[in-house]
Amino acid sequence: MGEHASRRDFRVGDVLRVSCPQARARVAHVSSFHASVEWPWGEIDPESGIGWNGRRAFAFPAGSIERIMSLFRTEPEPSDLRVGDSCLVGVPETLVRVIDIGRYDPPQDVGWLPRPHTMLVVVPADLPEEALPEDAGDTIDLESAAPLTIELVSRG
């Protein structure tokens, strides 16, 4: 159905349909504002200068801007997770708009493998331009180990 993203020449303004099947993950840490899970895709880059710990944090409450911008979701909700719990992580089918594109040669050191050559910065497609806070958006790593499906819905 969807074309593999790395074969597509995306542009700023494109509207994309993004999804990722859920995978099981273990909750590693919970704070007052985040629940961190052991990321089920990719692996720590031993050559990295960043020192990624293999986890991804999910914000709560649900209405927080960090939460609204995040593509990936947990089931149950991050606020219901406790250390040691098992949860599901994935991307429900979502429409996003590309607001920036990063291209890296050599691939960018982000702490995990594979290192990305291309990263799309996206926001929810229905979010008006004037409502965008500075540094808004989530990134889609086109070389991601996560099994993302990315389809072009409309050209911007």
Image: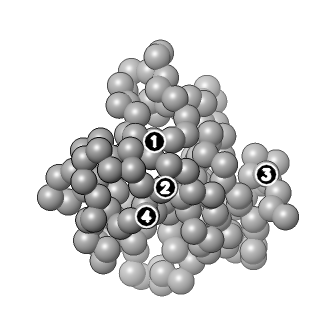
The residue positioned 24% from the left and 54% from the top of the image is 82
Which callout, 3 or 4, points at the residue further toward the start of the chain? 3
In front: label 3 or label 2: 2
Q: CA distance from mark 1 to mark 3?
A: 22 Å
To which residue does mark 1 refer? 39
Q: Which color scheme does this rendered protein use?
A: one colour
User: In this view of the protein, which residue sits in the foreground, 31 or 152?
Assistant: 31
C-beta proximity under 8 Å, tags 4 and 2: yes
The secondary element bearing badge 1 is classed as loop
To which residue does mark 2 refer? 89
User: In this view of the protein, which residue sits in the foreground, 109 or 23?
Assistant: 23
Q: CA distance from mark 4 to mark 2?
A: 7 Å
C-beta proximity under 8 Å, tags 1 and 2: yes
The secondary element bearing badge 4 is classed as strand
Q: CA distance from mark 3 to mark 2?
A: 21 Å
Q: CA distance from mark 4 to mark 1?
A: 14 Å
Which callout, 1 or 3, points at the residue further toward the start of the chain? 3
x and y, in percent, of residue 80 in the image: 27, 65
x and y, in percent, of residue 27 in the image: 33, 47
Quadrant of residue 58 within the rendered picture: bottom left
- Mark 1 belongs to which amino acid? Trp
The image quadrant where one finds the C terminus is bottom right
To which residue does mark 4 refer? 75
The secondary element bearing badge 2 is classed as strand
x and y, in percent, of residue 43 in the image: 52, 29
User: In this view of the protein, which residue sits in the foreground, 8 or 38?
Assistant: 38
- Mark 2 belongs to which amino acid? Val
